Image (tube, rainbow, N blue to C red):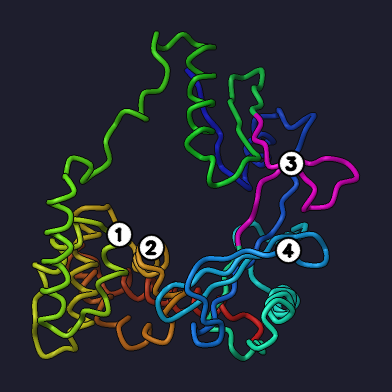
Amino acid sequence: KAVINSSGPWVDSIRKKDNSLKGKKLHLTKGVHIVVPHNKLPINNSIYFDVDDGRMIFAIPRGRITYIGTTDTTYKGDIKKPIATKEDCDYLIKAVNEMFPDSSLQNKDIISTWAGLRPLIHEEGKSPSELSRKDEIFISDSGLFSIAGGKLTAYRKMAERIINEVNSKHKLTKNSSNTENIKLYGANSNSKDITQTKENLFHKLKAISLENQYLSLWQRYGIRALKIVENIKLDDEPPLLNLIRSELSYCIREESTYHLLDFLLVRTGIIYFEPKHIENIIESLAQHLKGELCLDQEQISEQVAEVRNHLKNSLPFK
């Protein structure tokens, strides 16, 4: 009865196919992040600060690295491949060095970068930073419901609004969205169980000299991290590789991960935060994925090439 178009930067492309691209349109802006070694910007807590042009920059510590963002520039390139340019990186490095003169950051300190697009609503005469972050809903004569604008942090409220809008128009149910009442995995655990699980996780990791992986695993999976560690199959390979393979198995079986790039990019962030490890683990992980999903060699070779290509694009100007 209804189609919801919540395709981000592609919202207008779908509206165009629906012959309903009229009135308000998108204004895409690009945001860029850079990753540097933590010892180059050794902060202990997440911070944000203003720069001369009125933008706000943040820096976030994450283990052995610190990542910094973000820019806000009008984007007219390939929607599928936004990348960080040297100019983007220069802007962020200059901002950090002005706030922290002792850091003396340089382009050569950058480990990796990533870029994303904001699907904002165009407002004539306004710069990217001045555009409203408020989301809006467009309903076409064909019944296409499109939602754009907004911020990542408001995605639950945006989902609620668009679902309730469809519900109101089509009388699909008497009730509005009730997802706020659905408990997330692990929510039934009490504080005592959680404390005990954290202790067990740390001791099991310490027993195989991987206690430095404790925090990142806990932050990614919570109480589920223990399942990953308990299923590690130790062999002649380095313990860290065995842990990552166990994590890959978990993501395939429990979280519908079917692509190596998905695992290294979205699930773990290894591509961005520890790119130097990729070449040491990629072939082993590829064969592990091949066995788990019964892929052929051509399929797995394509996935490896995809990862290497993405890795190259994370430092496009070096």
Q: Are marks 3 and 4 in contact (CB under 8 Å)?
A: no
Question: Which of the numbered marks, if any, corresponds to residue 291?
Answer: none
Which residue lies at the image location 62% right of the left edge and 40% below the top edge?
A: 150
Q: Which residue is mark 3?
A: 132
219 sits to left or right of 314: left
The residue at which mark 1 appears reads as: 258
> Which circle, 2 or 4, is nearer the viewer?
4
**Location of mark 4 (residue):** 50
Report which residue position mark 2 lands on: 262
Mark 2 or mark 4, which has the lower sequence index?
A: 4
Label whose residue precedes the other's in the sequence (2 or 3):
3
Q: Position of residue 240 (x, y in %)?
A: 22, 82
Q: CA distance from mark 2 to mark 3?
A: 31 Å
Mark 3 vs mark 4, foreground winner is 4
Q: Position of residue 302 (x, y in %)?
A: 39, 72
Of the pair 123 and 95, the residue shown nearer to us: 95
Query: On the picture, is 175 further left or further right than 69?
Result: left
Q: CA distance from mark 1 to mark 3?
A: 37 Å
Q: Secondary structure beneath disc 2?
A: helix
Q: Is residue 264 above or below residue 4?
A: below
Asked if marks 2 and 4 touch (Cβ < 8 Å), the reply is: no
* Quadrant of res 69: bottom right
Query: Disc 1, disc 4: CB below 8 Å?
Result: no
The disc, 1 or 4, on the residue closer to the chain's N-terminal end is 4
- Give the residues drawn in magenta, as a range: 116-136
Q: Amino acid at mark 1?
A: Tyr
Q: Which quadrant of the structure image shows residue 147? A: top right
